Amino acid sequence: MDAPEHEELLRDLLALRERGLIRLRHLDLPHLRLAAARCHPATGHVAAVEKVLRDAVDRLGEGTLGSAAAYTFGLVRGTRDWTAAARRKRAADVYRLSVERFRKNQERMLLAQVADQIIALCGEGGEAGAPRVAVGARIPLESDGGRAILQVRPIELISGVDVLVNSENVYLEMARGFSPSVSGAIRKAGSRRGPAGELLDDTVQRELHEWMAAHHRPGLTVAPGTVAPTGPGSLAFNGVRRVYHAAVAVPRPGTGHQDVTPSTIMLAVHRVFALAEEERMAYRLKTICFPLLGTGAGRLAVRAGLHWLWSAICENLARSRGWEVHLSVPEPEKADIVLRQLSP
């Protein structure tokens, strides 16, 4: 089953934007239905179209683009039965533009981005069979410089790597230990605990607070892309020597959302390598392990986040010889996407 073409999807998306989800059952949207059948073959065609649309908009993240797209199609709770004009007005408000200016510029870009994401979903969902990789796999990757390895396991379980990179917010406040995030996992694994599991020392976060105090930033933010080093705490038992906290996520006030930009990811990677070069001799550093920066709380799509991360890694591997880089990807499904995107 072939994926629909971009222009074909755009025509269907324009029709759906005009008529709205409330009339979805009665609309002739052959190309959206083709994409839906490819991505969700076991779902009824009406539900599958809405699901693939939601999936595509979710991949845009919760910044202005994703928020405006959600209003455009009536995907925000309570907007499903809004008129096309009311949905367009609310989407324009997200960008703080007049309706006319939004219609001529941002709306066209927005619809094209949604079409791109649907095509990407067709490519990912259209691959037959289960993921090609299993949990625990170590797979060599092609790079422009040093050695690179994909590890299909959570970052806190990786052993024999000198530096773990933690994806952090600009307050350098780590997530709680029970959080299903890289930050929370590193915090929990790095803490010192007693025989009953009681917390004796929140080691990594304590050292991060000390770094903030030394740089006169307690309670304040650091610049996006800042990288702060700490010791590994109990992660030393895994052979880890240093944890580098990359401040890539900027929390949006009054919400639970965080924004991550490609330029911040690339800047953080450059600074990780620069710091590693500075500490190389003192800590005998040879290997660095990155998570997929920005694809968790930052809500970047895996392919987009990986593109910027890997571009910066390869640039630094070509410039600074002798490093071995690992990518930590816990889920086999995401690891499969990584392999497909990085395969020559």
Image (tube, rainbow, N blue to C red):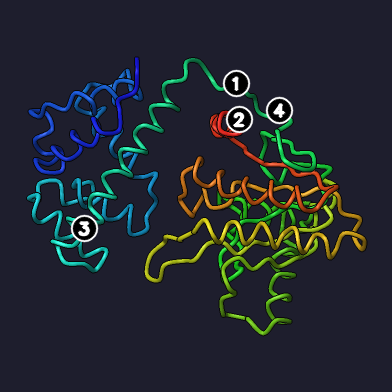
Q: Which residue is mark 3?
A: 91
- Amino acid type at mark 2: Leu
- Amino acid type at mark 4: Ala
Query: Is 115 placed left or right of 128 in the picture?
Result: left
Q: Secondary structure at mark 4?
A: loop
- Amino acid type at mark 3: Ala
Gap in Å between the C-alphas at discs 4 and 2? 12 Å
Query: Is 48 placed left or right of 303 in the picture?
Result: left
Which is nearer the eye, 284 or 240?
Answer: 284
Q: Residue furthest bottom?
A: 216
Can you give x and y, in whole percent of width and height, for residue 38 in the image?
34, 21
Residue 323 versus residue 38 in the image, above or below: below
Q: Which residue is mark 4?
A: 137
Which is nearer the eye, 95 or 214?
Answer: 95
Q: Secondary structure at mark 1?
A: loop
Question: Which of disc 3 and disc 4 is earlier in sequence?
Answer: 3
Q: Which residue is mark 1?
A: 132
Residue 156 versus residue 280 in the image, above or below: above
- Residue found 60% across the figure and 49% down from its top: 309
| Other-residue count near label 1 (Cα within 10 Å), few / some / many at <14 / 14–19 / ≥20 | few
CB under 8 Å between discs 2 and 1: yes
Question: Which of disc 1 and disc 3 is earlier in sequence?
Answer: 3
CB under 8 Å between discs 4 and 3: no
Q: Which residue is mark 2?
A: 339
Gap in Å between the C-alphas at discs 2 and 1? 9 Å
Question: Which of disc 1 and disc 2 is earlier in sequence?
Answer: 1
